Amino acid sequence: MPEGTFATAITCMDGRVQRPVQLWAKEHFGVDYIDTITEPGVDLLLTEHLIWQDDKIKGRVDISVNRHGSRQIVLVGHHDCAGNPVSEEEHREMIKKSVETILSWNFGVRVVGLWISESWQPEVVVDITPEN
Ligand SMILES: [Zn+2]
């Protein structure tokens, strides 16, 4: 394992969300580093279960959890997303479904679904720690 503590962010590639996600995750997870997995509109990808996308993202999470010791994952959806241009309500539903997808991978770590608002403020949608 490397020096320092890690958590994992699965987020949109949009440059506007990276700093709020990093700051939120470091503060709330109390870790040194955030491993960041980016895809455009990732809350849509993990809702629709496009198999190759799921496997690609799962493989990256595996490195963060099993090589860096991450025990916490944050999944992010955001306002004005070019990769997933739907309403806030639809984003929030997709964030919940994406968190279920991530939990189904059985890494046994906490998964938080985060919404980044129009003012780029993070808001927790769902926060689940699996019992095991
Ligand atoms: Zn986006």
Image (cartoon, grey):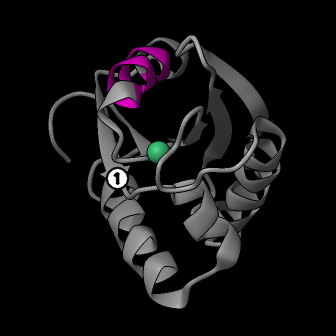
Identify which residue is drawn at 43% across, 47% down. 12
54 relative to 52, above or below: above
Q: Residue 49: horizontal and vertical position, in percent?
A: 64, 80
Question: Which residue is pictured at 34% across the width and 52% down the height?
Answer: 37
Judge the density around disc 1: few (<14), some (14-19), many (≥20) Cα neighbours within 10 Å.
some
- Identity of the residue drawn at 29% across and 33% down: 15
Tell me: 33 left or right of 102.
Answer: left
Query: What residue do we see at 45% from left, 71% from top?
Result: 58
Q: Can you name the residue that lies furthest to the bottom here?
A: 51
The front one of 91 and 70 is: 91
Label 1: which residue? 37
Along the horizontal axis of the image, is 51 left or right of 93? left
Estimate the x, y position of residue 34 in percent, counting from the top left: 32, 33
- Magenta span: predominant SS is helix
The stretch of residues the image draws in magenta is 17-25
- The magenta stretch spans residue 84: no
Is 24 in the magenta? yes
Amino acid marked by disc 1: Ile
